[in-house]
Amino acid sequence: MNSENKQTNWAQFIPLVTVFFFWGFVAASNDILIPVFKKTFDLTQLQSQLVSLAFYIAYTVGSLLYLLISYLTKGDIINRIGYKNSLALGLFISAIGTLLFYPAANTGSFPLMLSGLFIVALGFSLQQTVANPLAIALGPINTGSQRLTLAGGINNLGTTIGPLIVSYAIFGSSASSDTNMSIESVKIPYLILGAAFLLVAVFLKFSSLPDKPQAIVESDSEAASSKSSALKYPQLVLGMIAIFVYVGVEVSTASNLPAYMEKNLGFLTKDIAPYISLYWASLMIGRWTGAVEAFTDKMSVQQILRFIAPYLAFGVFLLVNAIAKHDLTPFYVYALIILVLIAADMASKGNPARMLLIFSALGIVALLVGMTTDGMISVYAFTSVGLFCSTLWPCIFTLAVSGLGKHTSQGSSFLIMMVMGGGFVSLLQGYVADETTIQTSYIVGVLCFAYLVFYAWKVSAILKNQGINFDKKVSGGH
């Protein structure tokens, strides 16, 4: 394939990943809204997780609408209107959702708040269906998963900043002793975000981003598969379940953390934001580490960057929290935990199946430590789940669509549909927490990681039977 010989098109890639930043900003900010809504609207832990459900179920609804419209019009709607136009349309839909925060905040309506989040995520669904394969296509195919990891790192820059900004909008300075929260203060950051959506939509419309990259055209024309549907491939079907449980454990671990810190450790709601920021920054730390191969194929340089990248990302977390005037003392010890991430990344040797296996096993260990300890040790254990979730999306995505050929776009849509796991798993953990304890409820996440360990083992055998071996890429310098 010709795309293997070309260089990454950074001029097109950089404006593309702006939308990845937006996804992270809003998703992580939900973790601040959950405890605020819980107190303001007097909700149970189960009811508070409707925030996650409304947000993540929209991805499924959006994917189903995309498939339905494509079926009724007898053609792929994204191919018809173009990748660039589809991104702009997705941003416009999300901007409409942010407008609902104004009447919702003024009237104190929880259902209207949920509706706004749903519409924002509906736009994100279309953006994700387009942007994930596009990020892979803007350069050599054998470093596509690394570009997706890098895009995820930009996503987590948004997840690191989002909780701090939304928390500041609601509570003011962390140095303030005022713990009163105003639901009306939520509308300002989301209206500003809506304006940003529209600006980026216009910018992308006039950018050099292709309507359909050549790499995707080549993939369609070169595919020799005789299978009639993406669902005929076991790596995709099992991968859909993997995406469901992966997004589920990633989101539910963070969304239930505020309640745990409040109830078990006595934290005030306004003081939790830095720890939510640390959780999502952990994903940024891991993704910056996993993306080093996208920049160079020199092994010596990669080894150096594997130590520089994670601590550079950790420095970003410390910087934004210093600007927000948070006490940084509790976070310095986290630098030692990052060493575990680096060792795991090196042990994976760039093989997505091996990385999925190692990181999922470490996720189980982290959750079990959090469940069986107390105090700050348990908090660090739960936040470190972010480190071990960091590269799972590109690993699962790459493994699930490998060998699909002309069905790759359809497979991508099915995978995006399963992002709904973020809502359902959070809801399930909220239910378990109400019936037992919040700390015990993290057994749900352990079961999610256990499936990912199984998928990593199973998909390796499936792909090898199809003649796909990722170790060949590693031995070739990647």
Image (cartoon, rainbow, N blue to C red):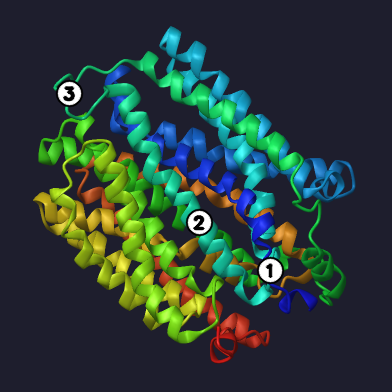
> As shown in the figure, which amino acid type bears the numbered disc 1?
Gly
> As shown in the figure, which amino acid type bears the numbered disc 2?
Gly
> Residue placed at 36% from the left, 50% from the top?
280
Q: Is 109 left, or right, of 397 in this rendering?
A: left
Q: Residues within 10 Å of mark 2 (few under 14, many from 20)?
A: many
Figure quadrant of residue 30: top left
**On screen, residue 365 above or below 184:** below
Taking depth in this image into account, of 278 and 195 the one nearest to the observer is 195
> Residue placed at 43% from the left, 63% from the top?
288
Quarter of the image with the C terminus is bottom right
Q: Residue 85: x and y, percent?
A: 78, 41
The local secondary structure at tag 3 comes to loop
From the image, state whether disc 3 or disc 2 is nearer to you: 3
Q: Residue 429: x and y, percent?
A: 33, 45
Residue at mark 1 to residue at mark 2: CA–CA distance:
16 Å
Q: Residue furthest top?
A: 107
N-terminal label among 3 and 2: 2
Q: Which residue is mark 1?
A: 139
Q: Residue 436: x and y, percent?
A: 20, 43
Taking depth in this image into account, of 36 and 147 the one nearest to the observer is 147
Figure quadrant of residue 94: top right
The local secondary structure at tag 1 comes to loop
Q: Residues within 10 Å of mark 1 (few under 14, many from 20)?
A: many
Q: Is 273 left, or right, of 353 in this rendering?
A: left
Q: Are marks 3 and 2 in contact (CB under 8 Å)?
A: no
Q: Which residue is mark 3?
A: 176
Q: Which residue is mark 2?
A: 152
Q: From this viewpoint, is residue 407 visible?
A: yes
